Amino acid sequence: MFVLAIAVSVSAYAADTAPRIFPAAQVQEVYRIVLDRDALLLESINAAIKEKGVQDGHVTITAGSVQECTYHYVMSTATKPVDAFKSVKGPFEILNGGGIVANGEPHIHITLSSPKGAFGGHLENNCRILYLGEVTLLKYAGPPLARKKNENGVAILQPK
């Protein structure tokens, strides 16, 4: 009986954590964007998304550096997220960044580094480019997605 209880428990856990896979989308267009010194990273990405009419897609920040950046990260493992916002100033390399665009809104995470180590989180406004920023923006054609908050206030991807 003990083995059966474990099997039922594992089965219930697997059902709760199963990935939700959406119907396939195709890359319709690819835009390569370069940002010069003092450009605002997220604001520039949002402007490109609007200018190119990207409702569904993907953003990849492939190279660059920032002189200041604001991001947020989770502070606890509670059911409802608790975020902390942080702004940093100094020369930081962009190690990577990216996220999905759904309903015209990007959800981008970024990793920065300095000689003291790497850090990052959810990209916010007011990240200012130091020397350059290189961004790739993909526009998808296919079933549209949107983010809707669940009962815990987490914005989850869902069919639009």
Image (cartoon, rainbow, N blue to C red):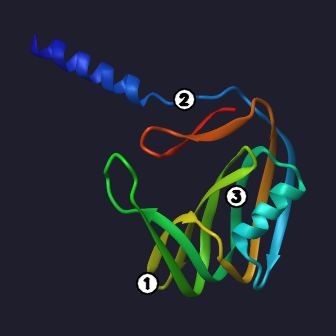
SS assignment at label 2: loop
Q: Nearer the viewer, mark 3 or mark 2?
A: 2
Q: Are marks 3 and 2 in contact (CB under 8 Å)?
A: no
Query: In 3D space, how far apart are the residues under numbered discs 3 and 2 (Cα atoms)?
Result: 22 Å
- Answer few, some or many: residues within 10 Å of disc 3's Cα (few below 14, many 20 plus, some between 14 and 19): some
The image position of residue 6, as x and y in percent, is 19, 20
User: Callout 1: few (<14), some (14-19), or many (20+) C-alpha neighbours within 10 Å?
Assistant: few
Q: Residues within 10 Å of mark 2 (few under 14, many from 20)?
A: few
| In this picture, residue 33 sits left or right of residue 114 | right
Residue 126 percent across, percent down from the top left: 65, 77
Q: Which residue is mark 3?
A: 60
Cα–Cα span, label 3 and label 1? 24 Å
Residue 60 in which image quadrant? bottom right
Dividing the picture into quadrants, the one containing residue 32 is bottom right
Q: Mark 3 or 1 closer to N-term? A: 3
Q: Residue at x 69, y 26 (%)?
A: 23
Q: Quadrant of the N terminus?
A: top left
Query: Alpha-carbon distance for marks 1 and 2?
Result: 38 Å
Identify which residue is drawn at 89% across, 53% down: 52
Residue 142 at x, y = what percent? 79, 31
Q: Quadrant of residue 76?
A: bottom left
How many numbered marks appear? 3
Badge number at residue 116:
1
Q: Dot 2 corresponds to which residue?
A: 20
Amino acid at pointer 3: Thr
